Image (cartoon, grey):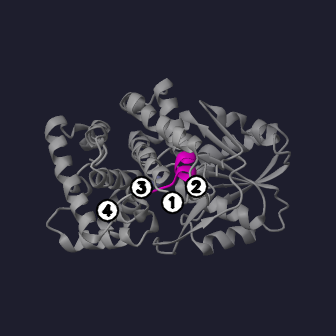
């Protein structure tokens, strides 16, 4: 099975063309959801472009958490407004809330991310949180976004750490898809077996990261945009998005999605950074020849590669137990080709940690320290 957003549009300053793209949906009245700050920055440009295309926008301010109460109150606010499409512009939680709201209103959603730190924008699923920010569940929707619009100058403006975190999330995609393709028991988030198409896309995603990742990070550091940056934004968002949803997930995300259980990690690190640590452990468990290649890449762009770099240590056995148990509870952990047990997972995490320390000795941690001051 293979499913995707209907249109993906990427380029510098395309925020000024949103009205034109929206006219493809034959809508004349849309909801425009952004954060308070987002309305003042990007919202003004979007609504002026919509106006030029004869589309009226109704502003909606996101409360900050993708929780059921926030979703329901936004749905209530939009009912009776005669809106035929919802634009969601901002970071991960806002986009997830946008998808959930549009689904409940039975209208198409247009996603305009302001960061490229995860591969979530193109997908048809949302992570729903409690009022206090704990992950409650994942909702899956029958429809993908009608359009995903990436203004690459806006993504550059968000800064290096977001882009690099997205590279960590995107690098895992190929290694997880590869496991799922080989394992006849795995089913993807789209509800079917992985396709050769999704595997090919995931592999190109990893190749793009290796080829352009370091250069793109350097360019973004100088607040510039170039071909490498464009390629990495596509890898982080489109290639990884199609890859993870249609190719399947495995241990890297089982661990990456369990790290937030540890408060200090949850408060200080991004999804892609936690997935990087998860991928290192997955590759250790697989005894993969690519471990050194991945770890060296992570060290060069500044992703964490040992426990110290996510503020943990091997002495904290009970904290590692929490992480391991949370990961084992996730069905995707068991997509691996070998049995994943408490002991085998502990061994993989510790082996990855020691390997990461060795790589740090070889390559240094300059990039990591620059992003984690
Ligand atoms: Zn992810």
N-term-proximal mark, 4 vs 1 = 1
Ligand 1 lies under 8 Å from the Cβ of mark 3? yes
Residue at screen point 38% across, 32% down: 210
3 or 1: mark nearer the eye:
1
What's the residue at 58%, 65% (across, down)? Answer: 63
**In the drawing, does residue 107 fall left or right of residue 67?**
right
Q: Which mark is residue 186?
A: 1
**Cα distance between the residues tagged 2 and 1:** 7 Å
Measure how far apart labels 4 and 2 are at the Cα level.
Answer: 33 Å
Look at the numbered disc 1 and say if its residue's Cβ is closer than 8 Å to ligand 1. Answer: no
Q: Which residue is mark 3?
A: 271
Mark 1 neighbour class, 10 Å CA radius: few under 14, some 14 to 19, many 20 or more: many
State how far apart marks 4 and 3 are (Cα): 10 Å
Magenta stretch bounds: 241-250
Residue at mark 4 to residue at mark 1: CA–CA distance: 29 Å
Q: Main secondary structure of the magenta part?
A: helix
Q: Secondary structure at mark 4?
A: helix
> x, y percentage for residue 321?
26, 72
In the image, 207 versus 38, the foreground residue is 207
- The tag earlier along the polypeptide, 4 or 2, is 2
Q: Earlier in the sequence, mark 4 or mark 3?
A: 4
Question: Mark 2 sits on what residue?
Answer: 193
Asked whether the residues under the numbered discs 3 and 1 touch, taking CB atoms below 8 Å apart as contact, a structural biologist would say no
Where does residue 72 sit, x and y in percent of width and height?
68, 73
Mark closest to the chain's N terminus, 3 or 2:
2
- Which-is-in-front pick, marks 3 and 2? 2
Q: Name the residue at 74% across, 72% down.
A: 76
């Amino acid at each position: 099975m293979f499913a995707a957003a209907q249109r993906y549009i990427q380029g510098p300053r395309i925020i000024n063309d949103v009205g034109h793209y929206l006219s493809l949906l034959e809508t004349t009245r849309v909801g425009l959801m952004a954060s308070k700050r987002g309305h003042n920055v990007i919202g003004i440009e979007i609504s002026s472009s919509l106006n030029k295309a004869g589309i009226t926008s109704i502003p909606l301010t996101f409360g900050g958490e993708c929780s059921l109460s926030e979703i329901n109150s936004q749905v209530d606010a939009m009912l009776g407004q005669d809106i035929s499409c919802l634009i969601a512009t901002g970071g991960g939680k806002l986009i997830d809330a946008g998808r959930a709201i549009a689904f409940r209103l039975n209208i198409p959603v247009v996603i305009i991310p302001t960061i490229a730190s995860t591969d979530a924008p193109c997908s048809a699923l949302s992570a729903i949180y409690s009022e206090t920010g704990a992950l409650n569940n994942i909702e899956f929707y029958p429809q993908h976004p009608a359009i995903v619009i990436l203004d690459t100058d806006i993504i550059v403006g968000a800064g290096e750490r977001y882009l690099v975190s997205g590279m960590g999330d995107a690098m895992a995609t190929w290694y997880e898809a590869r496991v799922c393709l080989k394992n006849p028991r795995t089913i993807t988030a789209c509800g079917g077996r992985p396709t050769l198409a999704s595997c090919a896309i995931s592999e190109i995603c990893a190749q793009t990261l290796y080829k352009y990742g370091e250069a793109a990070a350097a360019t973004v550091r100088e607040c510039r945009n170039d071909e490498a940056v464009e390629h990495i934004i596509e890898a982080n968002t489109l290639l990884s998005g199609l890859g993870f949803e249609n190719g399947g997930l495995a241990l890297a995300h089982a661990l990456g999605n369990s790290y937030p259980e540890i408060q200090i990690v949850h408060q200080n690190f991004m999804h892609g950074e936690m997935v990087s640590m998860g991928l290192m452990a997955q590759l250790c468990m697989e005894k993969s020849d690519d471990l050194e290649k991945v770890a060296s890449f992570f060290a060069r762009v500044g992703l964490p590669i040992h426990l110290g770099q996510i503020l943990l240590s091997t002495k904290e056995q009970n904290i590692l137990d929490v992480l391991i148990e949370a990961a084992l509870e996730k069905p995707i952990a068991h997509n691996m080709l070998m049995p994943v047990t408490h002991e085998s997972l502990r061994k993989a995490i510790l082996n990855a940690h020691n390997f990461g320390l060795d790589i740090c000795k070889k390559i240094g941690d300059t990039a990591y320290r620059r992003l984690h001051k």
